[in-house]
Amino acid sequence: MRIPKWVAVFWLPFLLLTACSEEESTGGDRVLARVHQKELLLSELDGMFPANATAEDSTLIIQAFVNRWSRDAVLQWEAERNLPADLNIDRLVRDYRSSLVSSHYEQVLVSLRLDSTVSKEQLEAYYESNKGQYQLERPIVRCLLIRVPYPLEDEESLQTLWNNGKITDTMALENYCERFAEVSLLQPEAWYSLDDIAAQLPEGTLTANNVNAKREFSLQEGGFRYYFRLLEVKPRLEIAPLSYVEDQARKVILHNRKRELLDEAREEIFDRELRRNNIETFTNR
């Protein structure tokens, strides 16, 4: 046992107070707690004490473990005392063990066999076949948004970069935002939830009712200056674009692959054992 000897010595007064004969039938081990006939031994705390633990640290570790163990043991005793007479606990344990073993093996199969690569063509094919599943519950937008602490660093330069659409100016704007902006959404192809965009602006500035009327604006409120440009909006109940649901679609594709892989593996194993005459059924007897 790797528990430091001084730990047992330190706790000896406690053990003597809680029980006078705790070494009976424990082979010299110390009993830390007892709930009905179930005992917690000091040796069960093996490995729980850090190498540099002080006496105070070890005391806290033991107290916490004893308290948790006692509560768990009392609940288990109460649960067992109230088991329904028709509950076959041994069968439940067997079924649970079987489920754990099977689940572990399935995880091994998936890690070895599952192709986790999803090509752009596969995504597009899945999306086209399942568009109806991706009806929007809330509006989404493509937009540009900047939130910069006010007063601004070189406000005139920022305004010029924001208004121009040249590649060089776009790169300069991104550089400016990296240095000064708290929020900068400058990817024109990206889709965002309208609610998420509205949360970055002063309350009530942008809503589903006014988004089409506020296609571009800048405003200063509190300690920030805001720049917003709407590029496109898709209202509620419209089909979401693939780029907006790509991650979700990829997860579904991989989930379906995993399910198919496991179904095939089960059939493969069953057929193999059937050929080897390791499966017998007796339903007709």
Image (spheres, rainbow, N blue to C red):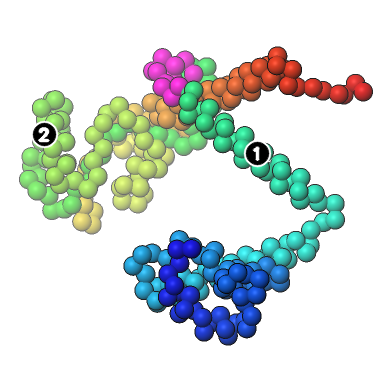
The spot of residue 149 in percent (x, y) is 18, 52
The spot of residue 274 in percent (x, y) is 72, 17
Q: Residue at x 16, y 36 (%)?
A: 174
Q: Is residue 275 above or below residue 233?
A: above
> How many numbered circles are shown?
2
The spot of residue 269 in percent (x, y) is 64, 21
* Farthest-out residue, front: 27
2 or 1: mark nearer the eye? 1
User: Does the magenta portion include 122?
Assistant: yes
- Mark number for residue 172? 2
Magenta part of the chain? 115-126
For marks 2 and 1, the one nearer the N-term is 1
Tell me if label 2 and label 1 are in contact, CB under 8 Å.
Answer: no
Helix, strand or loop under label 1 = helix
Q: Amino acid at mark 2?
A: Ala
Q: Is residue 279 above or below residue 3?
A: above
Q: Is residue 130 left or right of residue 197?
A: right
Quarter of the image with the C terminus in it = top right
Q: Is residue 163 left or right of residue 255?
A: left
Residues 48 and 197: in front is: 48
Residues 149 and 229: in front is: 149
In this rendering, does residue 258 appear at all? yes
Residue that carries the numbered disc 1 in the rendered image: 99
The spot of residue 71 in percent (x, y) is 62, 69
User: Does the magenta portion include 238?
Assistant: no
Alpha-carbon span between mark 2 and mark 1: 58 Å
Q: Amino acid at mark 1?
A: Ser
In this rendering, does residue 249 appear at all? no
Q: Residues within 10 Å of mark 2 (few under 14, many from 20)?
A: some
Which quarter of the picture shows residue 245?
A: top left
Q: Is residue 1 above or below residue 146?
A: below
Q: Residue at x 11, y 34 (%)?
A: 172
